[in-house]
Image (cartoon, rainbow, N blue to C red):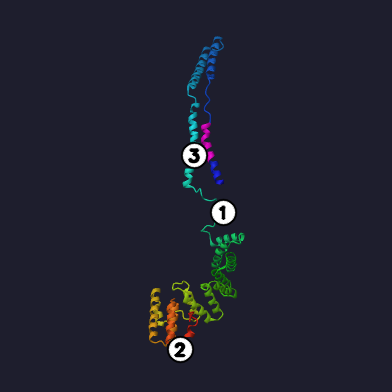
Amino acid sequence: MTLWFVFALMTAAAIFAVLWPLGRAGRPQKDGNETTVYQDQLAEIDRDLAAGLIGSPEAEAARVEISRRLLAAVDAEREPPLASNTSLRRSAAVIALVGLPIVAVALYLPLGSPRLGDFPLAQRATAPAVTQPLDNLVAQVEAHLEKNPTDGRGWNVLAPVLARLGRFDDAVRAYRNSITYNGENAERRADLGEVIAGAAGGVVTSEAKAEFERALALNPDEVKASYFLGLAAEQDGRATEAASIWRAMLAKAPPAAPWRPLVQAALARVGGPSAPALSDDTVAAAKDMSAADRGAMIHSMVERLASRLKQNGDDVEGWLRLVRAYMVMGDRDKAKSALTDARQAVANDAERLRQLNEGLKNLGLDG
């Protein structure tokens, strides 16, 4: 509203500036008094000359000067009065009064933003610029949250940034506030557990483990929580349990899951097979292959292993490698099918069946 009031004042000032010269009165008209004075002066000169008060040369010079002035006054009286331009001035005033606002509005509507809300100058001065350093932006958000501590959205934005900056203690507080004001979910609980572990130097403490367990209670498929629980088992010296957790993750994961290499590396670290066993010669040959070629080679080896086991089903270790290979490759259906075939193949040998069940019990397959 203030903006439109300012515009109205500016328009009024512009109209006044145009109308002021038009409203000024014209030059006052001569009413004939000046010619009468000059005529009286000529008569007075004649009287002074007759009385001998002035000489003939002086009288003649004065007579010429006064006559010149008299002629000029007569010509001025014959000019049309400026008052005759009154109608013209009125027309110009009407045009200025109506035309200026119309022209101003016609220019403002296409070039301005009449529907744009008010944006105070103070807010413009404090608006973050995209070119500002990250630390400055974080400081501005923190200052905002000090004044608005219940802004859950602000805490949700700030927490992961603090974690990336390595400010884990501050990130822990931010995630706790985010859960308080936004409500809990599996992702926020897992993120909180991760920064608690980060604050402890990467050690999954009992406090962090409790957050991961809460996350899994909310969502059993929460990947981050599962991975860190496996890491907690590894740090506690329970390598078999860690391998079991990570194998189950790989068995459920899609082939293109971005975290798959991380889990495979962790599984290899605790001594669990994360891929079909390859000979030294095969590994050396695979180093120069592209990712697609290596994948094709592994699939080919797995298929050859499956064909061999159909001919000789007594190889329990071979069945275990085949089932694990299918799980690592993300093909859970083939893994279950291979498990069924393996049990049928060794069904008549109690010892081999026991070995098979023992080797498969931690893979997360039903039955």
Q: Main secondary structure of the magenta part?
A: helix
- Residue 123, numbered circle: 1
Q: Which residues are magenta?
A: 11-23
**Where does residue 42 sit, x and y in percent of width and height?**
53, 14
Calculate the distance from the C-alpha at mark 1 to the C-alpha at mark 2: 75 Å
At a point 52% along the width and 39% down the height, the residue shown is: 14
Q: Answer yes or no: do the residues labelled 1 and 2 have beta carbons within 8 Å?
A: no
Inspect this view and state whether residue 95 appears. Answer: yes
Q: Is residue 246 above or below residue 26?
A: below
User: The disc labelled 2 sits on which kind of residue?
Assistant: Arg
**Where does residue 27 sit, x and y in percent of width and height?**
52, 26
Q: Is residue 238 above or below residue 94?
A: below
Calculate the distance from the C-alpha at mark 3 to the C-alpha at mark 2: 101 Å
For label 1, the SS is helix
For label 3, the SS is helix
**Where does residue 32 sit, x and y in percent of width and height?**
53, 19
The residue tagged 3 is 100
350 in magenta:
no
Inspect this view and state whether residue 288 appears. Answer: no
Residue depth check, mark 3 versus mark 2: number of the one nearer the observer:
2
Residue depth check, mark 1 versus mark 2: number of the one nearer the observer:
2
Tag count in the figure?
Answer: 3
Q: Residues within 10 Å of mark 1 (few under 14, many from 20)?
A: few
At a point 49% along the width and 42% down the height, the residue shown is: 104
User: The disc labelled 1 sits on which kind of residue?
Assistant: Gln
- Residue 352, numbered circle: 2
For label 2, the SS is helix
Q: Answer yes or no: do the residues labelled 3 and 1 have beta carbons within 8 Å?
A: no
User: The disc labelled 3 sits on which kind of residue?
Assistant: Leu
